[in-house]
Image (tube, rainbow, N blue to C red):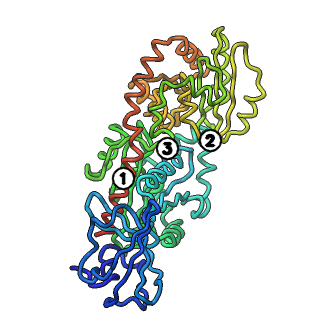
């Protein structure tokens, strides 16, 4: 059906709930449109032909906003247009933004890093089209004790027996069902109020605990049938908790073969599961181009041009960071040659202060950092990485071709990351800090082995370097196609 006036045309292209037709705008009037293009240019055209025909596609490229006049003054109608390349549909939105709600629980730095990466990719690829809100829905909108997930995570991460219990409690089907029903009964109303107030055009989950209850809320909002697209982005690498996989999602993005097999085993269809790699921070999208330029990067960071080991404890600085750094430092000092160690402590101010006070052996320079936003630069400057088996850090290290030595892992989902690194040939694992330190020192002294492991890391990292943009494109296409239908 062809639209018969401006309002008809717009509502025919998009949802009607955001449209208000000015009272003085008549279908018989001749209208002038001022188009403000994304590059700042402006164009004027007549809208009189809109009464019978849609806007010619060759006039509009990219994104613009316009205001309408009908001889009575500016009517204040401001909209935006985007061309969906996959379906050639015109998509109109109020204020030029489609709303995407990204849900997480801030348990570890990886989930928030992935959320911000997806947000950055959407902003870069579709400027002016999407508005993203990243929400820690459990902390900000859940009642007690659900709003204590972050502090509970930090405690459990330091007590592996507790983490192991919680992991398997949530994985065992009867107790998982009990937890989900309790969570739904306690949190659904609060989650419903928040999601309805934001009015998202799509919901993206980057956390295993953000599938079940949000999907129930969206179903209830749709009168029993969900109308808003829901996407899961799995941020675990070598394995994943069962709560990641819900058969009701539109898409489930997985980083590799192991997680893809788990998703299919939990009942998702091949049409739902899309494999793209792990979403990583924006600095790593093109970080591979800086690989091999560690001399210049060391200079920029104020480091000496000597063999360099980077020790990382994750965003929360967990994983036995102090003991690991001390052991690696002792082994490097015993080499009897100039070298340096950089320790990134994240948010762990206590460990940072203790390391800064420590006296290190001769020949070893030590730079202690807190939370850094340019991890890609620090990785490019290093010859070897020492870290807990967090999936994001492993993927980012692979992108820049950095050999990776693993010091620990959380029971459950991080266990699969150890064979992922070892079997790919770009790293090793040892839970004993003294043995790990000795292995790191030995590796730093073997230039041929370092070069071989770097090449193997780069081969693994290719899929992760492009993953964020590919995931963002698929999310955008899903939203634009749904709203244009």
- From the viewer's side, name the closer residue of 399 and 126: 126
Between residue 262 and residue 79, name the one nearer to us.
Answer: 79
Q: Distance between the Cα atoms at labels 3 and 2?
A: 20 Å
Residue 264 seen by the camera: yes
Image quadrant holding the N terminus, namely bottom left
Residue identifier under label 3: 282
Is residue 93 toward the left or the right of residue 314 in the image? left
Label 3: which secondary element: helix
Q: Residue at x 45, y 75 (%)?
A: 78
Pointer 3 with pointer 1, Cβ within 8 A: no
Q: Which mark is residue 316?
A: 2
Residue 208, horizontal then vertical, whole percent: 46, 51
The part of the image, by quadrant, that contains residue 344 is top right
Would you say residue 175 is visible in this rendering?
no
Q: Residue at x 51, y 67 (%)?
A: 191
- How crowded is the residue under tag 1: few (<14 C-alpha within 10 Å), some, or many (20+)? some
Of labels 3 and 2, the one closer to you:
3
């Amino acid at each position: 059906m062809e639209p018969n006036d401006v309002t008809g045309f717009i509502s025919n292209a998009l949802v009607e709930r955001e449209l208000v037709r000015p009272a003085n705008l008549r279908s018989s009037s001749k209208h002038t449109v001022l188009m403000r293009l994304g590059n700042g240019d402006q164009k004027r055209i007549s809208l009189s032909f809109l009464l019978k025909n849609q806007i010619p596609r060759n006039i509009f490229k990219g994104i613009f906003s316009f205001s309408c006049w009908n001889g009575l003054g500016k009517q204040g109608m401001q909209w935006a247009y985007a061309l969906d390349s996959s379906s050639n549909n015109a998509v109109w939105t109020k204020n030029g933004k489609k709303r995407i709600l990204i849900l997480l629980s801030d348990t570890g730095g990886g989930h928030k890093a992935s959320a911000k990466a997806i947000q950055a990719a959407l902003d870069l690829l579709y400027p002016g089209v999407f508005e993203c809100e990243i929400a820690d829905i459990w902390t900000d909108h859940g009642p007690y004790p659900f709003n204590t997930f972050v502090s509970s995570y930090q405690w459990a991460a330091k007590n592996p027996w507790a983490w192991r219990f919680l992991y398997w409690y949530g994985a065992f089907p009867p107790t998982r069902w009990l937890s989900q029903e309790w969570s739904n009964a306690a949190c659904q109303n609060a989650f419903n109020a928040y999601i309805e107030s934001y009015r998202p055009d799509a919901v993206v989950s980057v956390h295993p605990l953000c599938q079940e209850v949000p999907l129930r809320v969206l179903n209830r909002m749709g009168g029993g049938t969900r109308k808003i697209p829901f996407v899961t982005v799995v941020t675990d690498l070598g394995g994943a908790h069962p709560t990641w996989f819900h058969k009701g999602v539109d898409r489930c993005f997985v980083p590799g073969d192991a997680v893809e097999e788990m998703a299919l085993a939990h009942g998702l269809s091949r049409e739902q599961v899309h494999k793209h790699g792990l979403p990583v921070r924006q600095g790593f999208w093109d970080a591979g181009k800086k690989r091999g330029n560690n001399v210049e990067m060391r200079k920029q960071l104020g480091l000496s041009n000597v063999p360099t080991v980077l020790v990382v404890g994750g965003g929360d600085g967990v994983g036995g960071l102090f003991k690991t750094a001390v052991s690696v430092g002792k082994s490097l000092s015993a080499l009897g040659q100039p070298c340096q160690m950089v320790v990134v402590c994240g948010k762990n101010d206590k460990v940072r202060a203790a390391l800064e006070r420590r006296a290190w052996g001769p020949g070893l320079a030590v730079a202690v950092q807190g939370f850094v936003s340019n991890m890609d630069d620090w990785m490019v400057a290093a010859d070897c990485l020492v870290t807990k088996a967090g999936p994001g850090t492993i993927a980012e290290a692979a992108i820049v071709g950095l050999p990776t030595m693993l010091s620990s892992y959380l029971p459950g989902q991080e266990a699969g990351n150890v064979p992922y690194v070892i079997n790919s040939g770009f790293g090793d694992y040892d839970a004993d800090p003294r043995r790990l330190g000795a292995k790191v020192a030995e590796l730093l002294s073997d230039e041929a082995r370092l070069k071989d492991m770097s090449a193997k890391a780069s081969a693994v990292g290719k899929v992760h370097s492009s993953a964020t943009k590919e995931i963002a494109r698929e999310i955008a296409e899903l939203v634009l196609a749904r709203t244009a239908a």
